[in-house]
Image: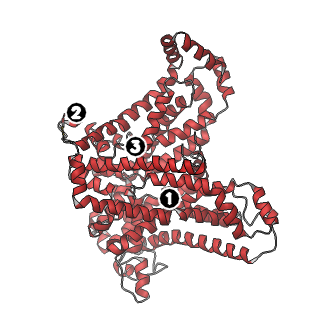
Amino acid sequence: MTAETVKNNCRIENKKGNAMLKNIKKHRYLLLMLTPGLLYFVIFRYIPIYGVLMAFQDYSLKYGVLGSKWVGLKHFISLFSGGDFQLVLKNTVLISFLKIICGFPAPIILALLFNELKDGYYKKITQTISYAPHFFSWVVVSGMLTSLLSPSVGMVNKIIQALGGQPIYFLADKNWFVQIIIMSDIWKEVGWGSIIYLAALAGINYEMHEAAVIDGASRIKRMVYINIPNILPTIATMLILRMGSLLDAGFDQIFNLESVAVRDVSDIIDTYVYRMGVGSFQYSFASAAGLFKSVIGIAMVLLTNRIARRLSDGESSIW
Amino acid sequence: MVKVQFGKGDKRFMHKKTTSDWVVNLMSYSLISLLCVTVLIPLWNLFVVSVSPVATDAMTFRFWPKAFDWKAWQGIITSEFIWRSFYNTIFRVVLGTAIAIIMTVLTAYPLSKKMLPFRKLFLIMVLFTMLFSGGLIPSYLLVVNMGLRNTIWSLVLPIAVSPFNVIIMKNFFAALPKSLEESATIDGANDLIVLFKIAIPMSMPVIATITLWLVVTHYNAWFDVVLYITERSRYVLQIVLREYQASKDPATMNLGTTEVVTMTPESIRAATTLFVMVPIIMVYTFLQKYFIKGISLGAIKE
């Protein structure tokens, strides 16, 4: 604590109100700097949070949140009694779970493999290439995928035909769509996701490996007994962050790849909210679906963080 | 590039190769090569399709194009629609990034000062938005009700400050050595002067990283354009590409050539996809170390 803090604390004890004013005056430039940012948060983050009250109303554009009629849980009841949303929820959880189960370990494995490469051009170049897809938008990746998977001109179907098979319309086939979603998601993010684990691997104490080598441990053994245990806290932290977005099944990706033909398996909460709200102007109903998602999201973060703190004595919780 | 020390290359680990070494090498080199091939093949495929615009050529698969026919490329390079969209993209990238980085610095710096009145309240205000948001519809209605539709502000203001970036930058400011700022204050400099003359110059690494992230975010953004922009003259490249993907007829694609009748829509789509990719690939390849640096910045826990 600086001398200034102590002095200020004393002042606050002596004359509270006066000191507060003095403190504000002293830091007026800091407060001035903060004003645009605070205004941003109030307008673009907190007004929408207040606006979510429309989920409990029959919102009309004319009257706004202040003047619209309150209807209680009407929209939530119709959300969960109609078959639509149950299917949407099922798709969301299914796609998201598959993405976690298949996609979460992928960057960890890749990082462990990168870690075994000799430093040099090969490593540099392969890292650069594998990180690149992270920087493409899903619009671009969807352009790439439609070209690659097109039943008439796509490379994949040409190969299938050359091998004597029938062309498959991957993106319009309910049996294939979810698999394409999962695979393309891993493809896009696996490289970039590995960076954080590579950093954790680089931080492992050198002496552990040295001692293991002297004891005759093979590289596989060192990978399993040194590398993996040492990056476990990072893995736990990343898993918490991932669980918080359990109901984020990947709006950008699905919105760009879906079509009516696969809607039974592709429709997720976010695409549903967009279609109901922006598409069919059912603002209150769509907000209810969105609010449900936000509440589950915050609950998941709090829950997984608490579990992680219990398990690791605070080491891998995010706060 | 992240430095990793415990690979095979480390001289201190040189010893006789065992079976285990061979297995590890085989696995890592082959799997990583395979991954890179899956990244490169789709890009090459796009290129092959883009230079095979005539329908009869496109129907048979070739790893190497039969002939390099640049008609599809000519079509998009000479299209006024494409270049106006490109200009719109650049405009939103420059304006959006400039506003966002200024706002982020101005928000983060005061929050890094322990003496700031109401600091805790302000911090909680920022952090809470990372956990909870109003969702799509209330934000959408806010922008619409503010009358921002079909203006550049609908694309710039709603994402002007990211709480993640504020926290990263706040932590960086807080970790700067205090002595310089203190001596400047004793010499009579106020907080504004300290920020611009001392704190910002010392924070250029983190400012560069966040700037690059913002550039990529704005370049790749498309959903806000779907929501708020209806005038075609205000489209950005990503939206043009989306439109082309839905379009079956090259004649409706606003190309700069009249030879469209002989072209497949696939070749134009492929050329446009590559056209949209090129700037981001260039930015990423030349500046990748700044992108990667930022990852470890984000890992600081308060």
Judged by depth in the image, the label closer to the viewer, 1 or 3, is 3
Q: Mark 2 lies on which chain?
A: A
On residue A83, the disc is: none
Q: Do labels 1 and 3 touch, CB within 8 Å?
A: no
| B108 in relation to B296, above or below | above
Element type where label 2 sits in the image: helix
The residue shown at (24%, 54%) is A79
Judged by depth in the image, the label closer to the viewer, 1 or 2, is 2
In space, the residues marked 1 and 2 are separated at their CA atoms by 42 Å
In space, the residues marked 2 and 3 are separated at their CA atoms by 22 Å
| B115 in relation to A45, above or below | above
Check disc 2 and report the residue beneath it.
Answer: A66
Q: Residues within 10 Å of mark 2 (few under 14, many from 20)?
A: few
Check disc 3 and report the residue beneath it.
Answer: B132
Q: What residue type is labelled 3?
A: Phe
Residue A172: % across, % down = 31, 72
Which quarter of the rendered picture does the C terminus of chain B lie within? Answer: top right
Residue A190: % across, % down = 53, 62
The residue shown at (68%, 55%) is A202
Check disc 1 and report the residue beneath it.
Answer: A134
Give the left or right position of residue A5, taking residue A206 as reference: left
